[in-house]
Amino acid sequence: MKYRVAPIPGFYRQVKIILKKYPRFIKDLEDYFELLENTGPIGRAMPGFPALFKDRLAIKSHNIGERGEVRIISYHDPASGKSIIVPLLIYLKSDLPNPPHSMISAAVKELRELIDQT
């Protein structure tokens, strides 16, 4: 099954911040999206947030392993029957060890607003 990867606008704002520090990271992110399209959601389900998955991503261009730096939180609800994965948050572990509940809730709210607009 092929999945569609559709990040929310807030995700791209966060990517820009990471690209300032790691300009060649864009290739790693493109590879990650391709993997999601072919395999579906990866990572661990987040406790307290059904349908949210947290994943690690290496920054290969800077020789930083997946335990070291980037975390991505994505939404995928298999019960909906849709094959869409929505990356919500991306952050550097060194800047933010764990995102606060309010940050995750704001990203989910942004997703809900986008769904309501369509």
Image: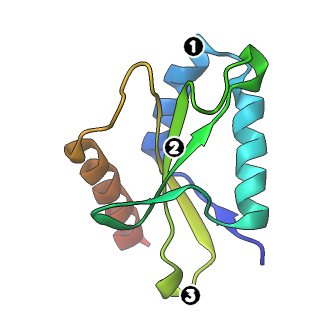
Residues 20 and 51: in front is 51
Instruction: Give amino acid for label 1.
Output: Lys
Q: Quadrant of the N terminus?
A: bottom right
Residue position for label 3: 81
Residue 101 percent location from the top left of the image: 22, 47
Q: Image quadrant of residue 102?
A: top left
**Helix, strand or loop under label 2:** strand
Q: Secondary structure at mark 1?
A: helix
Quick one: 110 or 81, which is closer to the camera?
81
- Tag of residue 72: 2
Which x, y percent locates residue 105? 25, 53
Q: Earlier in the sequence, mark 3 or mark 2?
A: 2
Q: CA distance from mark 3 to mark 2?
A: 23 Å
What is the C-alpha distance between the residues marked 2 and 1?
A: 17 Å
Residue shown at 75%/41% (left/top)? 30
Q: Earlier in the sequence, mark 2 or mark 1?
A: 1
